[in-house]
Amino acid sequence: MASVEESKSMTIIHHLEELRKRLIVCFVALVITASFSFSYVDEIRQLLVKPAGKLELIYISPPEALMVNIRLAIISGIMIAMPIFVYHFLAFMMPALYKNEKKMIIPVVFAMIIMFSIGIMFAYRIAFPFAIAFFLQFASEDLVAMFSITQYTTFVTQFLLTFGLVFQLPIVFLFLGVLNIVTAPFLRKIRKYMVLVIVIVSAIITPPDVVSQVMVAGPLLVLYEIGIILVMIVQFKKRKNEL
C-alpha cells in the first residue's frame, strides 16, 4: 500500500502532467492562430493604422517590417486563441475549487473578457483617434510626421492593451466586494488617495506622454466610481439575504 507521501507525490505528478498537456494544446492553438493571422497581417496593420487616417509608415532597418509582422501575428493569434486558453485554465482550476468558488470564477472570468473587449473598443474608437490626432497636429510644411512601423505599432498596441487592463477595475472591486475584503464606505473614504495612485499608475502603464496619461486616468476615475457602486449593490444584496 502506497504511503501518504507517495500518494501526494503521484497526485502532484498527475497535476503537472495534466498541466503540461494543456499547455501543449494552448501552444499548438497559438501556433495555428498566429500562422493564420500572419497570412492577414497586412489587413491587421491597416486596421491599426485606420484611426490615424492617411498615415504612411516606414521601416528603417531590413528586418524591421518582418519582425513587426510576426509580432502582430502573435498578438492577433493570442486574441483569437483566447477562448481556448480560458477553457483550459478553467478546466485545470475547477477540480481544486469549492462549489461556491466554482459558481463565482466562471462569471468573473467572462466578465473580465467582456470588460477587456469593451476597453479595447473604447480605446480604438474614441481614445486613440483623439490621441493620435493631437500628436499629428504638430506636423507642418517643414515638419513631416513619419512614424516607423515599430514605433507606431508598439504605441497603438500598448495603448489598446492598457485600456483593456484598465477596464478590469470594476470587476476587481466587485470580486473583492463579494469576498468582503473591501466595502463601499471604505472605497469612498480612500478616494482622494486613489486619485493620486491612479495618476501615478497612468503615468507608469502608458507611453511617456501627458495626453496618453490623461486619456487613461480619466476612464480610471470613472471606473473607480462604477466599482464603488457595484460593491455597494452586491453588499446590499448580501445583507438583504442575511435578514
Image (cartoon, grey):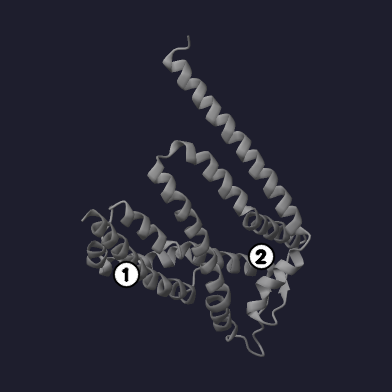
Q: CA distance from mark 2 to mark 1?
A: 33 Å
**Residue 82 at x, y = what percent?**
60, 53
Image point (54%, 44%), residue name: 89
Upstream in the sequence, badge 2 or badge 1? 2
Q: Amino acid at mark 1?
A: Val
**Residue 184 at x, y = what percent?**
26, 64
Is residue 41 left or right of 225 when viewed as pictured? right
- Mark 2 vs mark 1, foreground winner is 1
Nearer the observer, 155 or 233: 233
Which disc, if any, is residue 150? 2
Task: Say above or below: 118 vs 143.
Answer: above
Q: Amino acid at mark 2?
A: Thr
According to the image, label 1 marks what residue? 195
The answer to whether residue 59 is visible is: no
Nearer the observer, 63 or 54: 54
Badge count? 2
**Residue 220 at x, y = what percent?**
40, 69
Is residue 210 left or right of 228 when viewed as pictured? right
Locate the C terminus by quadrant. bottom left
Secondary structure found at label 1: helix
Image point (52%, 63%), residue name: 114
> In the rendered image, which quarter is residue 161 located in?
bottom right
> In the rendered image, which quarter is residue 27 located in?
top right
Secondary structure found at label 2: helix
